[in-house]
Image: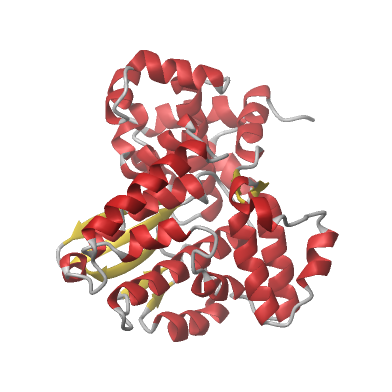
Amino acid sequence: MGRPKEECMLAKADSDDLKISMVMLHIIVTTAQKLGIDIQAILRQHGIALDLGHITQSTIERRKVLAVVRAVEHAAGNPAVSLLCGEDYDFEYTPQVKTFLMSAATFREALDTVLVVQRLISPALLLDIEEVGDTAVIRMHMDRVLPEEDERRHAELVFACLKTIGNRLMRKSIHPRSVHFRHGRAEIAPLYAEFFCCPIVLNAPHNALIYDRALADIPLPGRFPELRKQAAHILDQQVADSPLGDDPIQDLKRLLAQRGDLLHAPLERVAEALHMSARTLQRRLAKRDTSWVRFREQILFQMADQDLKSRRLTIDAICDKLGFSDRRSFARAFQRWAGVSPSAYRKRYLP
């Protein structure tokens, strides 16, 4: 018996793969070469060809990049190869990004560079930063539901990259207070502890790096305001010309990763948060064959799908997290999306 029409529509929206810059693939290629792995054979196996002459203007489906990571992980016999990939990243094909980053006056200013990296390299890089007491919490959100192991690899690469960038900015080793991962593979935890030199928390609610808040405003040794200004001007043009381009879907995902309160907000309020008119947002979404209401339904379904499968939260907690007034209204919405109740959907994915 086939799935209900609404579930098929939402599942299709979830499976349509995201394009990322070919630069991301080259990061993995470089790490594989250092490990002595025949990466050329792996690329051929997946029907992938690298064109270094046009690498910054070329894109690739993220699922293919993750497939290559899995193959390299298997060949290396190392379940955390993504840590090495993140550590190796040195902006080889995006020197202006490196200049923009390394000339920042403070960590707080350097984190602005992430917004540029999102547009030029990976729109899937959804980060939000919250200052809580004496800590700064950098959370990584997934733009859509991924299998747990692929989410793990994604988080490893991003966190390793952020740690390495922090060390370069300070010109010395700095360590997080703790690193949190949503997955529960305990056998990898010792590798994390050795790499990050801090406590590791598994089965956490979020993928997150926790740092001392005081680090945010420490003057950086490489600060160079005039050089940063010049790099920013060049990057503005590169973003405008990027094949990843101006994507309203990714703009909304980045916004909602930071502003969950907008999930149930009217279009006008969402458009205001994006600094545009409601009509402009409607027009941009229509060009992508969607609307604010349909997009919001997809995001809510993806979030519910992820939380129900992970079993980290109760159904009542998921209901509250997604902003529904009560469990009954959440159950009605989920029945419309998936054709079954939240509890039946969870049972379907029990081990």
* Residue visible at 54% across and 44% down in the picture: 144
Res. 38 in view: yes
Give the camera-side residue of 336 and 28: 28
Relative side of 26 to 180, left or right: right
Say if 346 sits above or below 294 in the image: below
Relative side of 16 to 251, left or right: right
Give the camera-side residue of 36 and 265: 36
Question: What colour scheme has been applied to the protein in the rendered image?
Answer: secondary structure
Res. 147 in view: no
Say if 158 sits above or below 170 in the image: above
- Place of residue 3 in the rendered image (x, y in percent of width and height, measured from the top left): 71, 30
- Place of residue 29 in the rendered image (x, y in percent of width and height, measured from the top left): 67, 68
Relative side of 105 to 42, left or right: left
Say if 219 sits above or below 139 in the image: below
* Residue visible at 38% across and 84% down in the picture: 197
Say if 250 sits above or below 155 in the image: above
Give the camera-side residue of 217 and 55: 55
- Place of residue 287 in the rendered image (x, y in percent of width and height, measured from the top left): 54, 19
- Place of residue 227 in the rendered image (x, y in percent of width and height, measured from the top left): 29, 58
Picture quadrant of residue 19: top right
Q: In which quadrant of the rendered image does the C terminus lie?
A: bottom right
Q: In which quadrant of the rendered image does the N terminus lie?
A: top right
* Residue visible at 47% across and 21% down in the picture: 284
Picture quadrant of residue 147: bottom right
